[in-house]
Every structure is written in C-alpha cells, then in structure tokens.
C-alpha cells in the first residue's frame, strides 16, 4: 500500500520578536518583546557548567542554547525518526535473506489421520499404525526479492522527501533557538540597563529629598515641598523594586532555555549598545529569504513528498513481480544429507479491490492540495516577516535618534530645575516634573536601543541567515 501522509505538514510553533505601537508621553512609542513558547522554552541540563558565577556572553548563551534547548533536540530526534522510516521503506526493495538450522525427532500416529491398515494374517506381516520415532536434520537458506514493485519504489521517494523536510525543519529549529536565546539575552540586558537607570533616579530623588529637608530646616522651604519630594522618592524606589524583580525573573527564564542551573548567578558581560548599519532594500531581503529560509524549503519538500504519495497511490493499480526461493540440505542425520531447493516467481495483477485504491488516491490528492496551500501560505508569511522586520528596523532606528536627543534635553532641564530650586526661585514641583522627564527619557532611550537590536535579529531571522550571522548582528554589522 502507498504511504499515507498527515493532512498537514506544519510542525507548529514559531518563535517571534514583536514590535507594537504604544501610546505615551515619551519619545519611544513602541514596545518590543520576544515570545518564547513550546519546547523552545525548555531545555535539558547542560554539562560542563563551571563553578561560581557564570560569565555569559551572547555567543556563549546561543552556543549553550543550541546544545541544550529542547526545540533543536526534538527536531533532531524527528529527523532521526524520518531517517529510520526511509531505511524501512528501502528494505521493501532490498533482498531479504535468512538461514535456518533444525534437527527434528517425530513419532506419528497414522490412525489419528484416518489411516487404518488391515493386512490378512496369511501374508505374515503387519503395517503398524504408529510410525517412529524417527529424526531428520535440515540446513536451509531463503531469499525473497522484489523484482518490480511500483508502490514500494514510490514509497521510498516519499520517505526521502519527508526525511529532507525533517532535516530542514531541524535547521529551522536552530534559527528559532538563536532568535529565542539572542532576543532573551537582549531583553535581559535591557532590563539590567533599566535597573541601573532607575537606581540613578532613586539616588537623584534621594538627593532632592535631602535638599528639601535642609531647606525646610533653614526655614526657606515649605513642608509640602518636603512631602512632595518624599512621595517622588518612594515612587522611584517602588519602580526600582519592580524592575529588579523583572530582571531576576528574566535571568531565570534565560537560564531555563539554555540549560543552566536556575540557582546560579549569571553575569551578562555584553551591555546594551547601539551601532548603526545600512538597511537592505525590501526586494533584496525578500529574495534572500526565499533562498535561505529553511522552513520554506521544508514546506517545499513536504509538497514533494505528497506528490510521491499520490503517485504511489495510483501505482497500487499496477502489477508487481517478486521471486522467492530457498536452498539447503536435509536428511535423516547430518552425515546423509542431500541438497534440496525451491524457487517461485510470481506476478500480482490487481483487478478489483473494492474501491480501496480509488479512496487512497482521493486521500493523497487532498493531502497534496493541503501541502500546496501551506507552501503558498508559507511564501506569503516569509515575505510578511521580511517586510515587518524592515519596518520595525526603520522605526527603531528613528526612535533611537529621537530618544537620544530627548535624553540630553531632559538632563539639561533637570539640572536647571535643581539649580533654580537650590537658589530658592523654584519649588519641588518643577524639580519633580523635570525628574519624571529624565526618567521617561532614559526609559525611552533604553527601549529604543533594545527595539533596534531586536529588529536586527528579526530581520536576520526573516531572511533565514540568523545562525550564520548572529555575531555580526549583535555587533551592528549588516548580515
């Protein structure tokens, strides 16, 4: 019978980096994030983990992720299973050879088989109804070989195409884990930068509160200014606690996806940075994606497998031929054996099988149509991924420039507000407002840099070149 494929060739699950518009008073009005789900969120325990704090660069994190993340491990196991199924299909076309050795002792009651011999007593002999015991030995080799089996030949082509699709899916799984690990690393270092920035805001709020207390003690400041600066200080402290908690949870999540112990201290040695690079043209990026995306190539291989499966179903109507034979020696004992053999050639011609072949053909046609539709959809998805990544990269690049400028102006405003407050010509209202502007500007600046770096990873993933160029992407070089 023809090999039957699942209706859908989609393996399911994909890791994505998203960028969404978000309203706000700051410059950076986009929120970027990495969504890691399915087996890519898990891992097996890594080996050779050093003692003490673990110094983790992005390259080392990705290397550990490729070794320990459950996504590539599962994909590689699926590829191994597909390879095994190809070998099973090949065995149907290869000769099957076996050998057997036996030594038998028997005693037969002929009367049980309906043989009853009645010889006249005058003849002087009788035929016993029980024969034996007697023994015989046998040494035989058997051969079975398919001469022409159109279904088995096409089934082998199905398994080859399916194996290729599984290998390409395993390659795509590596791309996905690079995006998952690299994006998580960037997200974690961005949170670390926010923690450092927020700590600076807490220190600044503490200095303002202390100054307000001094001025109140000197009688040059109202109590409301002290209270207002205290509220601002505690608000900044609350934000710091929240960010510190997020940072700890992100470190645990990063440890989880790369197989490191979750109770170990991770030291992320590559801070968040910004390096400009040229943005490729959409047509060039889309062409690169159509050439390099492993998931698209896997979908094409799935279509090929479905075409072979349809051909195999139609071949069920064709005749097949095979030979079977055995040769050996047999005799009452090993010293008196004689050669024996048997050979059979057969041709099987299907005539009527109750409509089963027609049903197999229709099922294979439906599967092929589904695989072709999935391939067309995958091409559209690839183009969408590239175009979205280019838009996100252009947007984030502009956001970085605006956020950097706004950050400088906000710092100048805060400095002037503090000078005015120290001179007694301004209240804490002006200082608190300026401090909020600095906090927003710092947050916008960090968010825009993170969005830009993540957009570069997304573009490399969209073009199918992330694993080979992630080091260059991390350093701001064009892939």
Image (cartoon, rainbow, N blue to C red):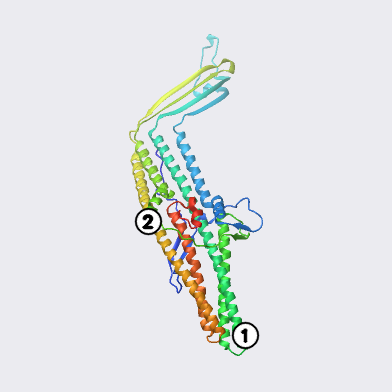
Q: Which of 448 and 39 is in front in this view?
A: 448
Please provide percent x and percent y for residue 236.
Answer: 56, 75
Q: Crowding near pointer 1: few (<14 within 10 Å), some, many (20+)? A: some
Q: Earlier in the sequence, mark 2 or mark 1?
A: 1
Would residue 32 be visible to someone looking at this image? yes
In whole angstroms, how far apart are the C-alphas of marks 2 and 1?
60 Å
Q: Residue tagged by mark 1?
A: 214
Q: Crowding near pointer 2: few (<14 within 10 Å), some, many (20+)? A: some
Quadrant that contains the N terminus:
top left
Vertical position of residue 388 compared to residue 25: above or below: above
- For this orientation, the residue located farthest to the right is 51
- For this orientation, the residue located farthest to the bottom is 219
Please provide percent x and percent y for residue 187.
Answer: 52, 62
Q: Nearer the viewer, residue 88 or 62?
A: 62
- Label 2's element? helix
Q: Residue 282 carries which label?
A: 2
Q: Which of 224 and 10 is in front in this view?
A: 224
Q: Residue 7 carries which label?
A: none
Q: Total of numbered circles in the picture?
A: 2
Would residue 30 be visible to someone looking at this image? no
Residue drawn where x is 57% and y is 22% of the image: 107
Please provide percent x and percent y for residue 193.
Answer: 55, 66
Please indicate whether residue 267 sits to the left or right of residue 170 in the image.
right
- Label 1's element? helix
Please indicate whether residue 51 sits to the left or right of residue 188 in the image.
right
Vertical position of residue 365 compared to residue 124: above or below: below
């Amino acid at each position: 019978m023809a090999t039957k494929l699942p209706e859908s060739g989609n393996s399911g699950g994909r890791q994505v980096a998203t960028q969404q518009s978000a309203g706000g008073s700051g410059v950076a009005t986009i929120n970027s994030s990495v969504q890691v789900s399915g087996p890519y969120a898990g891992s097996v325990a890594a080996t050779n983990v050093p003692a003490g704090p673990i110094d983790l660069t992005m390259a080392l994190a990705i290397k550990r992720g490729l070794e320990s993340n459950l996504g590539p491990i599962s994909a590689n196991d699926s590829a191994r299973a597909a390879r095994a199924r190809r070998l099973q299909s090949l065995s149907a076309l290869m000769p099957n050879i076996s050998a057997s050795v036996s030594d038998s002792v028997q005693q037969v009651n002929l009367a049980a088989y309906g043989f009853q011999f009645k010889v006249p007593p005058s003849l002087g002999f009788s035929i016993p109804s029980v024969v034996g015991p007697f023994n015989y030995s046998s040494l035989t080799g058997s051969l079975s070989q398919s001469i022409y089996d159109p279904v088995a030949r096409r089934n082998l082509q199905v398994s080859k195409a399916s194996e290729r699709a599984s290998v390409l899916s395993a390659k795509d799984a590596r791309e996905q884990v690079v995006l998952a690990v690299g994006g998580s690393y960037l997200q974690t270092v961005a949170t670390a930068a926010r923690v450092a920035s927020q700590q600076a805001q807490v220190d600044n709020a503490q200095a303002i509160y202390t100054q307000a207390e001094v001025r109140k003690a000197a009688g040059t400041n109202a109590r409301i200014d002290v209270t207002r600066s205290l509220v601002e200080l505690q608000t900044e402290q609350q934000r710091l606690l929240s960010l510190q908690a997020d940072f700890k949870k992100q470190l645990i999540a990063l440890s989880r996806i790369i197989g490191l112990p979750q109770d170990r201290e991770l030291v992320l040695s590559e801070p968040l940075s910004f390096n400009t690079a040229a943005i490729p043209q959409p047509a060039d990026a889309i062409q690169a994606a159509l050439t390099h995306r492993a998931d698209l190539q896997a979908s094409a291989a799935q279509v090929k497998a479905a075409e072979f499966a349809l051909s195999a179903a139609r071949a069920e109507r064709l005749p097949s031929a095979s030979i079977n034979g055995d040769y050996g020696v047999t005799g009452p004992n090993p010293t008196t054996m004689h050669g024996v053999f048997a050979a059979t050639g057969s041709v099987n011609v299907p005539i009527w099988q109750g409509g089963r072949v027609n049903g197999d053909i229709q099922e294979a046609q439906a599967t092929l149509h589904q695989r072709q539709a999935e391939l067309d959809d995958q091409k559209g998805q690839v183009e969408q991924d590239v175009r979205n990544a280019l838009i996100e990269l252009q947007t984030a690049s502009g956001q970085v420039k605006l956020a950097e400028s706004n950050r400088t102006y906000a710092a100048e405003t805060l400095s002037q507000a503090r000078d005015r407050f120290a001179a007694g010509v301004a209240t804490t209202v002006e200082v608190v407002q300026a401090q909020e502007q600095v906090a927003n500007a710092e947050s916008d600046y960090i968010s825009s840099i993170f969005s830009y770096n993540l957009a570069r990873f997304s573009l490399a993933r969209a073009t199918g070149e992330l694993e080979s160029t992630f080091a260059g992407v991390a350093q701001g070089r064009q892939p």
